Image (tube, rainbow, N blue to C red):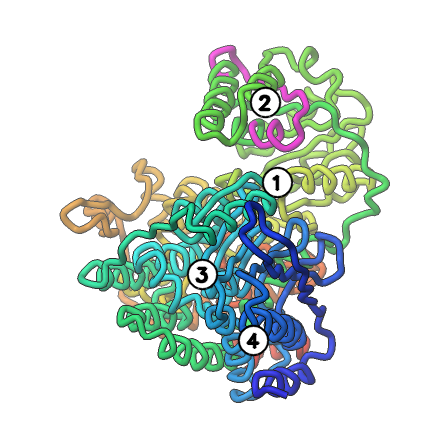
Amino acid sequence: MSTTAELLKGAAELFPDEVVTSAHVRHLDLPFGAGRFALVTLDNGFDHTKPTTFGPQSLANLNAAIDQVEQEAAAGTIVGAGITGKPFIFAVGADLKGVELLKKHDEALAIGKGGHDVFKRLAALAVPTFAYYNGAAMGGGVEVGLHCTYRTVSKAIPAFSLPEVFLGLVPGWGGCALLPNLIGAERAVSVIIENSLNQNRQLKGKQVFELGIADALFEGADFLEQSLIWTAKVLKGETEVVRTEIDRGEGWDAAVAKGRAIADSKVHGAAPAAYRALDIIAAAKSGDLQAGFDAEDTALADLIMGGELRSGIYAFNLVQKRAKRPAGAPDKSLARPVTKVGVVGAGLMASQLALLFLRRLEVPVVLTDIDQERVDKGVGYVHAEIQKLLGKGRINQDKANRLTALVTGVLDKAEGFADADFIIEAVFEEMSVKQKVFAEVEAVAPAHAILATNTSSLSVSEMASKLRHPERVVGFHFFNPVAILPLLEIVRGEQTDDASLATAFGVAKKLKKTAVLTKDAPAFVVNRILTRFMGEIQNVIDEGTPVVTAEKAIEPLGLPMSPLVLLELVGPAIGLHVSETLNRAFPERFTVSPNLAAVVKAGKRGFYVYNAENGFKPELDPEVAALLVQGDSVLTEEQVRDRVLDAVAQEIGLMLEEGVVAEAQDIDLCLITGAGWPFHLGGITPYLDREGVSERVNGKKFLAPGVASVPA
């Protein structure tokens, strides 16, 4: 037994529940008499819903397949070898379920070395090797192809990435060393660092080709056939693969520096994975691949043993598993069909909602508002966005025409909503206004229609209280920008029935949103926590702590933006409104900042200004500074941070006692998908547990031992 085989056999004992991927070798004669070819197909035996992954036994199977191919190559019975995947899936990387089980540094090191030892054999074969990216490829799936001599990619690939940094790892099976040496440091940094830290942005097949990762691009329908024809031409010398020369001078260093700036802007030094990956990319400038592989092994083992990866896996499991089975959702068989949608309002939020319903449900959508000018503007917005999609090639002309025809606007609610199945309001955030709107809608809508509100903080039960049928009113709270943020808080009012709720969850699924059921409590989940968080920041500023100190205090969390930049994104007026709502509900914990009220009254868009001469970094607006009235209590950054985290821990504890959501995991899911809470922190509750805040404030941890798989 080879050393690699022994290593993998030992590692496999640590992964008892691995979904094993087989590596089948079959032989075929290439076109044009190019010769006999060995093709390895990765397949875990499941349908396309179960992605192919690499655990120790899977690597051992690929290693055995390469044993066979190596012998054939040495004997001269084949002219080349290729690797591809089952339909729709190439391979999506390491088996993360097993990674969670590793307890020792040398066990983690063995996994890194095992992957390298197997994949490197593809580059060492006596014949050229080809990777055929036929479907989704991520992590180790991308990396196994990087070890091959040539690569082709399907235009139909929906997802291609090196997501390791997003999860708290580095591309540890060759990605950091090989990719910059293939496509240059600048492009490699974009794929490994920038895409990962931008919520794991995926590449499509065409982008993979344009970046130079793949040497040829083919249609999905006959991808493998075309790839083999191309392979034959390459082997016969009829097709020459020309790659761009790599800049190993100042351009390489500049790319790494840019990557560090991106990491600083995203995680503020609070998460090590991006910086470890950049160190390896920087060293890869020498072209010494083995040194790069060794550095990957060490970084991989160190990070597997650290808290960031365990946090990332916990967060990943939330958005991939818990999000697909919303806690408390009624049986989906109760859901009613939705064949027409009504939108009350035609402002920006309402227009965004109309566009989303139109694109995802592809049913008639009708907007109403108080005058024709507003209606026309809302419909015009939707039409313009459809044209943008057409111009970008996201939809074809036929679909653009169909979508355009499906959206209309009317002034008369009776005309627009008489046959609507789902009607959502997005009007001014005031109870009396919303109650009036729902009364008007109920008078003309069919009896089965769901009446949904996009309120961000008001009581759904109170909104429905004056209706004849309050049971069909449900909260349907989106987050801005609607097209980007996945979260949808579905709020059950006191009288909302199961059929209405089931329909709401069914619509949410078609909208491709992460739906979380919440109790009808003030500001629901995200806005309640963020308002408490922001409220403490504003309190310490009001009391006398300098703005810059209050902002810097939160940097160690590695949040995507500082509190006052977030306030600017949300809008000071909205922030003030939500704080007023929560102050009425919980005056002992939620204050209304007089300074924030002054900023809103002055019509300011935020606390900061951005000037070109300062690189557009946020600077306190002098006009805002003049408005601030502060006390003389000045806190240190550590004191501010402790105070803010204590407040958040207290609020989450109270929310769980009130039953606002089913479990702490739902709060984590809400903040990750609705507020951009970083994956590397693994959710707010495990972070508060790890830092000892939960027990300090509430006397106990939020999560049961083992739930988050995050070491203390």
Mark 3 vs mark 4: which is more N-terminal?
3
Q: Give how far apart the Cα atoms at labels 1 and 3 are.
A: 22 Å
Q: Quadrant of residue 56?
A: bottom right
Crowd rating for badge 1 (residues with CA inside 10 Å; few <14, some 14–19, many 20+): few
Q: Quadrant of residue 1?
A: bottom right
The residue that label 3 is drawn on is 149
The residue that label 4 is drawn on is 689
Q: Give how far apart the Cα atoms at labels 3 and 2 are.
A: 40 Å
The residue that label 2 is drawn on is 399
Is 177 in front, or is 33?
33
Mark 2 vs mark 1: which is more N-terminal?
1
> Of the residues shown, which amino acid type is indicated by label 4?
Asp
Is 522 in front, or is 712?
712
Range drawn in magenta: 355-374
**Looking at the image, do the residues carrying marks 3 and 4 touch, with CB atoms under 8 Å apart?**
no
Mark 2 vs mark 4: which is more N-terminal?
2
Q: Would residue 388 be found to the left or right of residue 555 on screen?
A: right
Residue 709 location, x and y as percent? Answer: 62, 75
